Amino acid sequence: MEVTVNRKAHFNAAHRLYRKDWSFEKNDAVFGKCNNPNFHGHNYELIVSVTGEIDKETGFVMDMKVLKDLIEAEVEDQLDHKNLNLEVPEFKDLNPTAENIAVVIYNKLKPKLDDKLALEITLYETPRNFVTYSGK
């Protein structure tokens, strides 16, 4: 029997959506206000979902304390109160869209999980705009 456990987390970060190889005008046409050269911020809400079999001994899919600590170390400590474009190496040459942020978070967490567990990342950039990534 497979069950999905979920852990919510939160971080605040600034970013600018733009491509270095495009003119300011083209960036502005594509990314609008998100192309602000002075950056802008979001209060990101994150849901990390782990799916797997329930362990017969513990009754857990995954120890939630372990998941909490993993999210804190790999996501919150590395992204919270950061300028994603300037301070986070993964975004040096990667546009920090919500889609790309979700993939980066997935890639940070997945190697730390047991291979038998499936991972899905849901990232809310605003209460109405969110993305989901499960490694596919």
Image: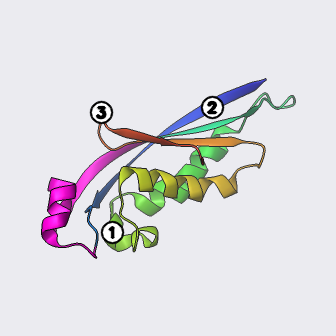
Please tell me whether residue 88 belongs to the stretch shown in magenta. no
Q: Are marks 2 and 3 in contact (CB under 8 Å)?
A: no
- Residue 55: quarter of image: top right
Question: Viewer-nearest of labels 2 and 1?
Answer: 1
What amino acid is at disc 1?
Asn
The correct choice, above or below, for 25 with respect to 40 in the image is below
Mark-to-mark CA distance, 2 and 3:
23 Å
Quick one: which residue is furthest to the left in this view? 25
Residue at image mark 1: 85
Q: Which residue is mark 3?
A: 128
Q: Amino acid at mark 2?
A: Val
* Mark positioned earlier in the residue sequence (2 or 1): 2
Whichever of callouts 2 and 3 sits on the residue coming sooner in the sequence is 2
Q: CA distance from mark 2 to mark 1?
A: 31 Å
In this picture, residue 121 sits left or right of residue 51: left
- Farthest-out residue, top: 1
**Image side of residue 70 versus residue 95, left or right:** right
Q: Nearer the viewer, mark 2 or mark 3?
A: 3
The amino acid on which the numbered mark 3 sits, given as a three-letter code, is Arg
Q: Is residue 26 above or below residue 66?
A: below
Which residue is identified by label 2? Answer: 5
Q: Is residue 37 magenta?
A: yes
Q: Which residues are magenta?
A: 20-45
Name the secondary structure under disc 2: strand
Q: Earlier in the sequence, mark 1 or mark 3?
A: 1
Indicate whether 37 appears above or below 69.
below
